Image (cartoon, helix red, strand yellow):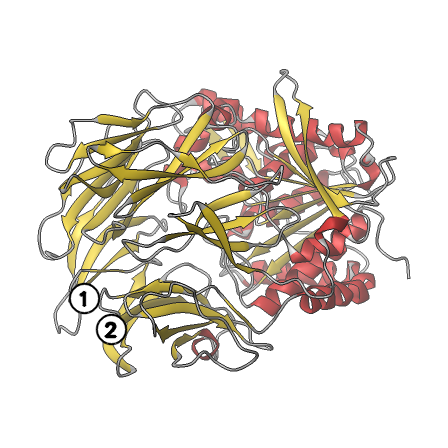
Amino acid sequence: MTQPPLAERRPTTRVHHGDSVVDEYEWLRDKEDPATIAYLEAENAYAEQQTAHLAGLREQIFDEIKSRTQETDLSVPVRHGDWWYYTRTREGQQYAIRCRCPITDRDDWTPPTLDGEAPIEGEEILLDANVEAQGHEFFSLGAFSLSDDDALLAWSVDTTGDERYTIRIKDVRTGKLLGDEITGAAAGATWSADGSHLFYTVVDDAWRPYQVWRHRVGADESDVLVFEEPDERYFVGVGRSQSERYLVISVGSKITSESRVLEADDPTGEFRVVLPRREGVEYGIEHVVVDGQDHFLLLHNEGAPNFELAVVPVDDPTQRTVVIPADDTTRLDDVDVFKRFVAVSYRREALTRVAIMPIVDGGFGPLEEITFEEELFSCGVGANAEWDPPFLRLGYTSFVTPGSVYDYDLASGTLVLRRQVPVLGGYDPAQYRQERAWATADDGTRVPISIVYRHDTPRDGTAPALLYGYGSYEASMDPGFSIPRLSLLDRGFVYAVAHVRGGGEMGRHWYEDGKLLAKRNTFTDFIACAHYLVDAGWTTADRLVAEGGSAGGLLMGAVANMAPDAFAGILAEVPFVDALTSILDPSLPLTVIEWDEWGDPLHDPDVYAYMKSYSPYENVGPHAYPRICAVTSLNDTRVLYVEPAKWVAKLRSVAVTDQPILLKTEMSAGHGGVSGRYAAWRERAWELAWILDAAGAAPTT
């Protein structure tokens, strides 16, 4: 197939705010239409034909990923009650196995480790996902929740990628599968204190979690609706406080939140509101005991854009005492509460931080930040299941340091390394460099860029480069290690992350300056970062590839229209490129809740005009676009496959370019792509080979 498939033009017209728009490819939205499936399959065949010359490179990269990965491995066990809980993998198997083993010495907090291929002594297999996945092309584990007495396991699975899960329950003492089965649930499941009831959420037709239900284990009776949120802007979740004292229903839109609590030992009681929702005020709670009295720690943004931490009595949450005041330089993110201390997570200078705050007589002691030596890094509180531990489990990584698990010794203030992800084949972090640079945006704003490369990469403009970006929902693209990325770095690539506005790297204002009617800042920031890489001698435009997924795919589509000559190639994964059409339609999944992020073009003509000015599909023009590859999944419920399908069809009909424009659709997956680690490695190898080719760095034979 030397010519790309051409989608049939079936014009439809929509009118909003007096603006009449003809859409020739909207018919591709109907995935029940055989013509749609035939078109997607033809696109897949064309993508395979156009990249056939990369087959050997793809296999080589897959082998590199596989050879660097310790396939038989063990996570660091987490202690709860009388057991150590962990996951392990076996060579040749796609999925992890969930296990536990008994604690033999209650005074010893050193987690067990693997001894070669042999299982840990006393191991019990709780769930083997390889067995559960048999007969399914796609498999995703959602909930994995044990009752407080470690006797009952509730887990959920999705076998299509549509994020609707089936919950089952097993008595792990006997291995007996109970008759309970809950279908159509969201991913999570939460136990009452006595293990008699299970709480879960369900999603509506727009895939919004909106109801909390209560299920009595083993009962031949209908489940009970506990809470329903009618406002389509709000998502609903249910969980437990870290102390396990309270069940908590969390209700939140993009800008407003509310919490409801119930004692976990009273599962049939009534949930009560902690603080009534107020438009624009976000808050979260955690139970804490101070001087023998129950309180909530309240993390909120009322009059505090970067959030403030206060303590309030459980019986009167309006009586606040400030614990950590708001700070323009520090964005408070989260708190994890234990019997004797609070772990505070925050962000400063575009890096994550964790500090310990002791609980003392009368309140709280001073913050003590846990420090690390690298210039760029990510740290965060890990899995901590005990209420009164002598250690705090932490996760740590950087662009050059593989993922590491530490236990922070509270008594000595020292870090104990429990595990670092092994990288086989002689990986030497000293051979790589990471650094922070700053681009200048059109309005003079300094935009941080993280850069990683091999120490011997030339700085003369000859190196190929990959620039990654996201820039929405206050999500931060923090430093992290990647085994697949080594296949680029070892081929001379410079890898950079543009920390553009719309993300959360620099605090709440960084997010506010890249959303709603300031959204274009996200795109111009990314273009400024691309220009910086060229001007600073890292690469040239004809060797620079851009990558982004989901809302980052919107970024890719926008910069393709705004600066097509700045890139040699653009890889857009599950891209939100038909943003205006989607946000105009409140019947589509997630649209109404997204109005707080993008604005409401359905009812506000100014928002409509602004979104139309940048929405990628709306702004495809007769430009000399670079190579473009869009990757999507047929069963994606977050960004529907139709968006990249329409985008590619329109690019083909309008663009003035001789560069290939590809669409690759996974026909049995969801938003996260294929399931199974080997399948995921092959998918990433396919993408990396395309990136190498687009940058002119792939072998010619």
Residue 244 location (% of width, % of height) = 22, 54
On the picture, is 697 further left or further right than 174? right
Please identify the residue farthest to the top as the structure is shown: 443
Q: Which residue is mark 1?
A: 195
x 45%, y 27%: residue: 330
On the picture, is 501 further left or further right than 303? right
Is the residue under label 2 in contact with that under label 1 (CB below 8 Å)?
yes
Mark pair 1, 2: CA separation: 8 Å
On the picture, is 397 further left or further right than 395? right
x 34%, y 71%: residue: 105
Tell me, yes or no, if residue 537 can be seen here: yes
Q: Label 1 amino acid?
A: Gly
Above or below for 562 versus 81: above
Q: Pick the quarter of the image with the C terminus.
A: bottom right
Camera-nearest residue between 112 and 68: 112
Q: Label 2 amino acid?
A: Ala
Q: Quadrant of residue 127?
A: bottom left
Residue 115 location (% of width, % of height) = 53, 77
Residue 151 - label: 2
Camera-nearest residue between 539 and 382: 382
Camera-nearest residue between 608 and 254: 254
Q: Quadrant of residue 344?
A: top left
Residue 248 - label: none
x 26%, y 83%: residue: 174
Q: Secondary structure at mark 1?
A: loop
Could you tell which of marks 1 and 2 lies nearer the N-terminus?
A: 2
Tell me, yes or no, if residue 96 can be seen here: no
